[in-house]
Image (cartoon, rainbow, N blue to C red):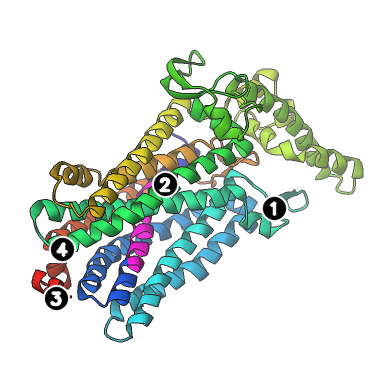
Amino acid sequence: MDVVDLSRLQFAVTALYHFLFVPLTLGLAVLLGIMETVYVATGRAIWRDLVKFWGVLFGINFAMGVATGITMEFQFGTNWAYYSHYVGDIFGAPLAIEGMMAFFLEATFVGLFFFGWNRMGKYAHLFCTWMVALGTNLSAIWILIANGWMQYPVGSTFNAETMRMEVTNFADVVFNPVAQAKFVHTISAGYVTGSIFVLAVSAYYLLRRRHVELAKRSLTVAACFGLIASLGAVVMGDESGYSMGKHQKMKVAAIEAEWDTQKAPASFTLIGLPSVKDRATHYKIEIPYMLGIIATRSLDQQVTGINDLEQQAKLRIKSGMIAYQALEKLKADRGNTALKATLDAHVADLGYALLLKRIRPDVANATPAEIAAAAASTIPNVPVLFWAFRIMVGLGFFFILLFGFSYWVTLNKQHESYRWYLWVALFSLPLPWISSELGWTVAEYGRQPWVIEGVLPTALGASSTTAGNVLFSLIGFFLFYSTLLVADLYLLAKYIRLGPEGALGHRVAAPAQLAAE
């Protein structure tokens, strides 16, 4: 593996580790706000105990999320130096705002949440709890604005004088439709993760017949909130599909394993066996019209297949080669208006010409075979995306069924009547993390070979370092992050086993007290 591959692997490992903690933080923060709102509204001590207990688990996960997240941003400078140079003016702004506005806001109110119970009134503490939830969401939105720009680079242009991408309209960057759809879909997935976590732990207590009253109330909140969140995740996932259909056609075609363009409206392949060698999907079961509706919101627009998109990439590479040649000549003759006009006419395809850099250094002399190879490189790993997407979607619909039944159980006050349901809820605990990691695999792996869609190939964004240096740091990160993950799981399991009384250090409300309340 070369420097680029190792740098990609390192960032993938750290990102996937970090995203083990992020969804639970997003979900638990809002659930804490809901539970404390009920406490303030009713004055019942059991709800305060609920907030404190789930707050302990939130605090453990939050600390681990911070520790794993900070190192990721340093990799942009250490492993992806040219990427940082090329797009730093655009990509750096959302990251800076996230750090200054969202993270510090979140960290400040997290401290007040834990240490302010006996130092401020109920309403003031409730405000702090909701500010923690707001901070977590603001952190997510600015990160996803940065990531959304990588998927669909709007509000920016290439400056031939500085040889960098620069902002032309920051509002377009912020309100990027891809970023907005990704934000709502991602936080909905986080809310599902937090709800499943509370649901599973509550089911564990009910199966063990421990802390029954707290478990019932926690399960009720998780069921109601989780049902809304899971429905929202599916709806916004559909919106993300529509955004991809407009702006990332190759990713949609790869997810669908659609090798040839279908007659509109395209069918959706429910299941099948995609073959890269044959460029075909065998044994497939299709749902008529569905892909066309998801990707185009119409019945008369085509969803372009992989083979046709590959041919379009060849044309864009040839156009980009013209831009590249004009740019090279402008270095020696910066006042040449004809060259500037040529560059402006083809600059949108410059990134496609840069795909040739990994094949040969002198882009202008690329042969038809090399152009064909560069065009073929725009096809991501079809089988990986095909199956990752279907498993993720299948889990999403399972969550809706689970939360729907949970809501029915709580509505009829039959929390302990269906032990099989409690076991299902308990063993569903790891599923939202699997779904989230698969979602990020689809989003990021599906963008390859681009670090910025259509603008900068991943192969050109890496730092000028040695493979040995990257491998050494990769091993270090893996060991460090694995230690943090083990510590997180140990602490969560410890305090779940201790239960509310062990975690809080005092007796919670007894059933007789609850009846009196």
Q: Is residue 466 left or right of residue 510?
A: right
Question: At 80% across and 45% down in the image, what residue appears?
Answer: 331
Mark 3 crowd level (few <14, some 14–19, many ≥20, 10 Å Cα) = few
**Label 4 SS:** helix
Q: Which residue, given by chain and number where applicable, does mark 3 sit on?
A: 516
**Quadrant where the image shows the N terminus:** top left
Separation (CA) of disc 3 from disc 2: 37 Å
Q: Which residue, given by chain and number where applicable, does mark 2 sit on?
A: 231
Disc 4 and disc 1 in contact, CB within 8 angstroms: no
Count of all numbered marks drawn on residues in the image: 4
Question: Closer to the camera, 44 or 311?
Answer: 44
- Residue mark closest to the camera, 2 vs 1: 2
- Residue mark closest to the camera, 4 vs 3: 3
Disc 2 and disc 1 in contact, CB within 8 angstroms: no
In this rendering, the answer to whether 297 lies above or below 493 is above
Separation (CA) of disc 3 from disc 1: 61 Å
**Residue 24 picture location, percent across and down:** 33, 56
Residue extent of the magenta highlight = 15-34
Q: Is residue 254 left or right of residue 37?
A: right
Separation (CA) of disc 2 from disc 1: 32 Å
Question: At 70% across and 31% down in the image, what residue appears?
Answer: 362
Question: Closer to the camera, 113 or 72?
Answer: 113
Question: At 25% across and 43% down in the image, what residue appears?
Answer: 428
In this rendering, the answer to whether 289 lies above or below 429 is above
Q: Is residue 486 visible?
A: no
User: Mark 4 vs mark 2: which is more N-terminal?
Assistant: 4
